[in-house]
Image: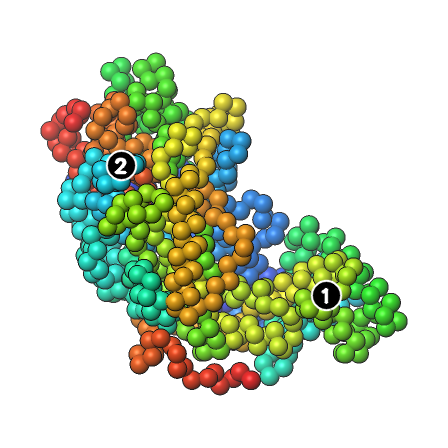
């Protein structure tokens, strides 16, 4: 049998891969999608409609498995979907939490859904502040793609008229809860913006998908498809074209190259057999997620590319950035003590956020450059996590827990790091996975600029909570979460105009290999103060159409 | 959240969900009459049961007893090798402490005697020197009891957990005339 040559091979089916698969199959191209994990079955794998007493360990998880758990999302509700077989390592002194969902749809199955647009304050960061990177795109280049993506996936928010977080095309926002009104009053007093978050979760029926019905626990997967994920929205459309060959349990090993040094396909390991399989294609898109994509590039060594494919700049795997996550301020709202519980978290969503407010008018006003955003969390949660901090036992304890049920509040920081020479990914010289593929090794430390943001938030968000009449109860030794928690890593295949310093051009096409493209957050020179997923989809849509144009012209030249 | 009745079948649990009125599909074996502890001995389990009922008592509302919280404590410890030794040592500590002060095992003490022991473990102001092991043990039992109680349907009802109901639209703050929430009526249930 003569082996098929696909038009495009795409590694990864998450946010970036999903939109590329949809766009190219709908345009008539034959696509082979390579995905490292299995397909999920919403009826079995999404347990969001189960109550804790329907779970064996009441959703707390098996204590015997505690050491193997990877991040907060690897919980009993999502057991069996997180990658535990393929190893990665950390350099001495590096901590990294890496919850990898390699199932079809990737992390879009279990994501936080916050979906703000990047703006020129992000794309021109270096011009504005003198530090960091300018992107090879401007807001006006990407804005039309944001609009198309928002209409496709459904994003709920309000018009806010702040150029630093540009408005999009939105469904109605989530309604403010009691706690939002209380905090907003304090935020107004101290000049911190407190606004509706942009949430890729439907407040109205949209494109054939039902509106959210507020069952809670969204981050454990949505079995009604009311928030965006590629298995609900993009992949069924792609499969309906008949142009998609989706290979599951296929661990991408390396990108194949021909004599001219062009990409000619992908080699992967079939996890069910352990056999290596080669897929031939005229173009390749890598969208395996920031770290995994760079890992595949580094493992794609050949006589033409001894240091990994598309790595003449030496920048593959470098410039690793992340969002610092953590709760610099926690406390409670005494106004709500003893009040009837309000369904604060049945949407399990970020109803509100505090978009970057620092360094806007004067880029060097603070002790740090750029800025961070915050998300409020709190009110009534399903489990009263604060209960272990309530002293005592007996009827008085029981009453105290009930009185405080609506009151807890905390604020999560989302602070971007700057590219640092010491923060990167390379191949571990000793450790391989069970098929012999060298493991990714991570080198990462928080930088001073980001740590200053953390300290700033501790002071200013506390001030806001006090102004709102809240009671701060932050532990004296509060620390950020370990790197990796946010899942917002960027930069390892960053885009830029100069081939000497950047891996891809402004279209996500690698400078060295014109038919090899990147379509995930590894392109982004830094994480900004916003979340990455919406931008991954928008940039991937733009890259996919650029590839399609090249394909139709039968050229794959350097741009 | 809808109750997923089919998921509620873990061998041996009496009060977790079986006793909470879940519908069972045809052919399901009848629930067992009595919980058989997986880790604790019968006499140890009796102490754990008593402790859980003192931690979350049955008063105006159901407590740990109705929620079967002690079954959860046993189940979790049975799956947590690291917790087993300290749990058993803690039970010995409690027994010795009871006999030293009151000449009888904990279960035979009067309520006031039991609470005099637990108060010194539970309240910072009443901590006594040399009781670190006892405090650690009590915190373990208290932590698991609290987890077991508030993750049960009984615990959800205790807090009037909003997840027990369906919400068709994004719920909105009802206090339209009091955005500052400065003049909310006092809660009816609280003393």
Image location (x, y in percent) of residue A368: 35, 44
> In the rendered image, which quarter is residue B119 located in?
bottom right
The label number, if any, that marks residue A126 in the structure image: none
Q: Which mark is residue B127?
A: 1
The answer to whether A130 is drawn above or below residue B69 in the figure is above
Chain ID at mark 1: B
Picture layout, residue B44 above or below residue A555: below
Disc nearest the viewer among 2 and 1? 2
Could one spot residue B65 in this view of the protein?
no
Residue at image mark 2: A130
Q: Position of residue B81 (x, y in %)?
A: 69, 50
Comparing A276 with A94, the one in front is A94
Question: Looking at the image, which residue sits at the far right?
Answer: B103
Side (left or right) of B187 relative to A559: right
Q: Is residue B58 left or right of residue A373?
A: right
Q: Are marks 2 and 1 in contact (CB under 8 Å)?
A: no
Residue A7, placed above or below residue B31:
above
Residue occupying the point 11% across, 29% down: A553
Q: Disc 2: which chain? A: A
Query: Which one is in front, B158 or A9?
Result: B158
User: Which residue is found at the position 28% from the left and 25% from the top?
Assistant: A501
Disc 1 residue crowd, few under 14, some 14–19, many 20+, Cα 10 Å: some
Observer able to see residue A399: yes
Residue A299 drawn at (x, y percent): 39, 24
> Residue placed at 23% from the left, 65% from the top?
A172
């Amino acid at each position: 049998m003569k082996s098929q040559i696909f038009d495009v091979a795409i590694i990864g089916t998450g946010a970036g891969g999903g939109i590329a698969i949809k766009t190219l199959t709908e345009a008539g191209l034959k696509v082979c999608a390579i995905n490292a994990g299995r397909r999920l079955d919403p009826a079995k794998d999404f347990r969001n409609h189960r109550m804790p007493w329907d779970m064996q360990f009441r959703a707390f998880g098996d204590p015997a498995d505690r050491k193997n758990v990877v991040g907060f999302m690897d919980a009993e509700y999502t057991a069996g979907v997180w990658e535990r077989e393929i190893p990665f390592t950390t350099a001495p002194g590096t901590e990294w939490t890496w919850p990898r969902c390699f199932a079809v749809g990737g992390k879009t199955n279990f994501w936080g859904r916050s979906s703000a647009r990047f703006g020129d304050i992000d794309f021109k960061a270096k011009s504005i502040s003198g530090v960091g990177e300018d992107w090879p795109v401007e807001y006006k280049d990407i804005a039309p793609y944001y609009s198309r993506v928002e209409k496709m996936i459904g994003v709920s928010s309000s018009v806010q008229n702040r150029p630093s977080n540009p408005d999009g095309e939105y469904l109605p926002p989530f309604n403010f809860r009691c706690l939002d009104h209380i905090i907003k009053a304090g935020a107004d007093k101290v000049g911190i913006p407190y606004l509706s978050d942009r949430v890729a979760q439907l407040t109205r029926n949209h494109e054939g998908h039902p509106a959210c019905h507020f069952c809670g626990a969204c981050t454990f997967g949505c079995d009604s498809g009311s928030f965006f994920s590629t298995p609900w929205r993009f992949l069924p459309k792609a499969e309906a074209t008949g142009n998609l060959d989706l290979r599951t349990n296929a661990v991408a090993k390396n990108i194949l190259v021909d004599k001219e040094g062009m990409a000619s396909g992908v080699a992967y390991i079939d996890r069910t057999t352990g056999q290596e399989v080669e897929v031939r294609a005229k173009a390749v898109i890598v969208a395996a997620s920031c770290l995994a994509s760079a890992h595949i590039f580094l493992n794609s060594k050949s006589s033409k590319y001894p240091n990994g494919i598309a790595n003449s700049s030496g920048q593959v795997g470098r410039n690793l950035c992340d969002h610092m996550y953590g709760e610099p301020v926690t406390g409670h709202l005494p106004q709500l003590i003893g009040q009837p519980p309000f369904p604060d978290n049945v949407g399990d969503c970020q109803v509100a956020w505090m978009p970057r407010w620092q360094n806007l008018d004067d880029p060097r006003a603070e002790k740090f450059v750029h800025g961070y955003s915050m998300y409020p969390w709190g009110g009534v949660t399903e489990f009263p996590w604060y209960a272990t901090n309530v002293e005592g036992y007996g009827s008085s304890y029981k009453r105290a827990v009930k009185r405080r049920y609506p009151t807890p509040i905390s604020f999560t920081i989302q602070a971007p790091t700057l590219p640092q020479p010491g923060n990167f990914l390379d191949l571990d010289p000793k450790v391989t996975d069970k098929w012999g593929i060298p493991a990714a090794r991570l080198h990462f430390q928080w930088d001073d600029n980001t740590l200053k943001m953390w300290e700033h938030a501790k002071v200013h968000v506390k001030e806001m909570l006090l102004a709102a009449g809240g009671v701060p109860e932050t532990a004296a030794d509060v620390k950020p979460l370990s790197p990796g928690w946010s899942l917002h890593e960027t930069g390892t295949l960053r885009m830029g105009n100069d081939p000497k310093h950047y891996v891809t051009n402004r279209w996500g096409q690698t400078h060295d290999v014109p038919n090899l493209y990147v379509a995930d957050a590894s392109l982004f020179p830094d994480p900004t103060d916003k979340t990455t997923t919406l931008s991954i989809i928008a940039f991937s849509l733009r890259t996919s159409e650029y590839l399609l144009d090249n394909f139709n012209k039968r050229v794959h030249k350097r741009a | 959240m809808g109750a997923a009745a089919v998921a509620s079948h873990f061998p041996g649990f009496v009060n977790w969900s079986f006793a909470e009125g879940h519908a069972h599909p045809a052919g399901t074996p009848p629930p067992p009459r009595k919980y058989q502890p997986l880790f604790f001995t019968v006499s140890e389990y009796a102490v754990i049961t008593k402790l859980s009922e003192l931690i979350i008592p049955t008063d105006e509302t159901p407590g740990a007893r109705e929620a079967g919280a002690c079954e959860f404590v046993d189940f979790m410890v049975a799956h947590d090798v690291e917790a087993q030794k300290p749990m058993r040592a803690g039970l010995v500590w409690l027994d010795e402490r009871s006999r030293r002060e009151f000449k009888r095992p904990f279960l035979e003490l009067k309520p006031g005697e039991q609470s005099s022991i637990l108060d010194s473990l539970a309240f910072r102001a009443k901590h006594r020197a040399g009781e670190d092991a006892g405090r650690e043990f009590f915190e373990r039992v208290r932590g698991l009891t609290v987890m077991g109680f508030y993750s049960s349907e009984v615990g959800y009802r205790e807090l009037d957990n909003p997840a027990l109901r369906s919400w068709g639209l994004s719920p909105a703050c009802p206090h339209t005339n009091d955005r500052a929430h400065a003049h909310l009526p006092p809660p009816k249930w609280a003393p």
